[in-house]
């Protein structure tokens, strides 16, 4: 993509996703940490993400974690527990539940 064609929304999302990816294994990383990283208030991030993605900040962070988890399931032979820990979604039961909510399939049903 041509850098000049990127609008402010795209640049904002790229910064948000980069910050989440840099803190992927930190299960405590949340909206206040994201706000600190981006030098914005939590309410500013909330409003921007809600407008751009129609998701709340915590849900957006979880979605990025789950996308990374899905990639790891396809690309590695790691267990779902290992992947849950690596993506900051430490509780394997909760990981499986939210993974199925996000993608419509349980992580255990995805073959390597």
Image (cartoon, rainbow, N blue to C red):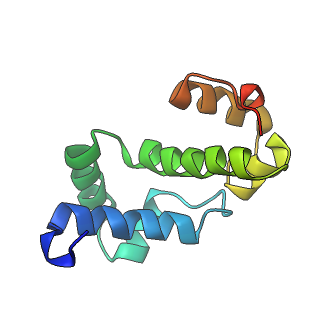
User: Where is 11 relative to 46, above or below?
Assistant: below
Q: Is residue 33 visible?
A: no
Q: Position of residue 27 (x, y in %)?
A: 66, 56
User: Where is 90 relative to 34, above or below?
Assistant: above
Looking at the rendered image, the quarter that the C terminus falls into is top right
The quarter of the picture where residue 96 lies is top right
Q: Position of residue 30 (x, y in %)?
A: 51, 57
User: Where is 107 relative to 45, above or below?
Assistant: above
Left or right, 35 with reference to 44: right
Q: Residue at x 21, y 73 (%)?
A: 2
The quarter of the picture where residue 22 lies is bottom right
Q: Residue at x 61, y 26 (%)?
A: 100
Looking at the rendered image, the quarter that the N terminus falls into is bottom left
Q: Position of residue 6 (x, y in %)?
A: 18, 68
User: Where is 76 relative to 3, above or below?
Assistant: above
Which residue is more in the foreground, 11 or 35? 11
Which residue is more in the foreground, 71 or 83? 71
Left or right, 107 with reference to 62: right
Q: Residue at x 22, y 54 (%)?
A: 48
Q: Residue at x 60, y 31 (%)?
A: 98
């Amino acid at each position: 993509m041509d850098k000049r064609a990127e609008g402010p929304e795209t640049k904002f999302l790229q910064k948000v996703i980069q910050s989440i990816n840099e803190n992927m294994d930190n299960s405590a990383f949340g909206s206040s940490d994201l706000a600190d990283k981006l030098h914005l208030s939590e309410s500013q991030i909330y409003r921007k993400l809600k407008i751009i993605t129609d998701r709340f900040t915590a849900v957006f962070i979880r979605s990025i974690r789950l996308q990374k988890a899905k990639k790891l399931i396809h690309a590695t032979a790691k267990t779902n527990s290992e992947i849950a820990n690596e993506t900051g979604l430490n509780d394997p039961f909760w990981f499986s539940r939210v993974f199925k909510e996000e993608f419509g399939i349980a992580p255990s049903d995805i073959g390597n």
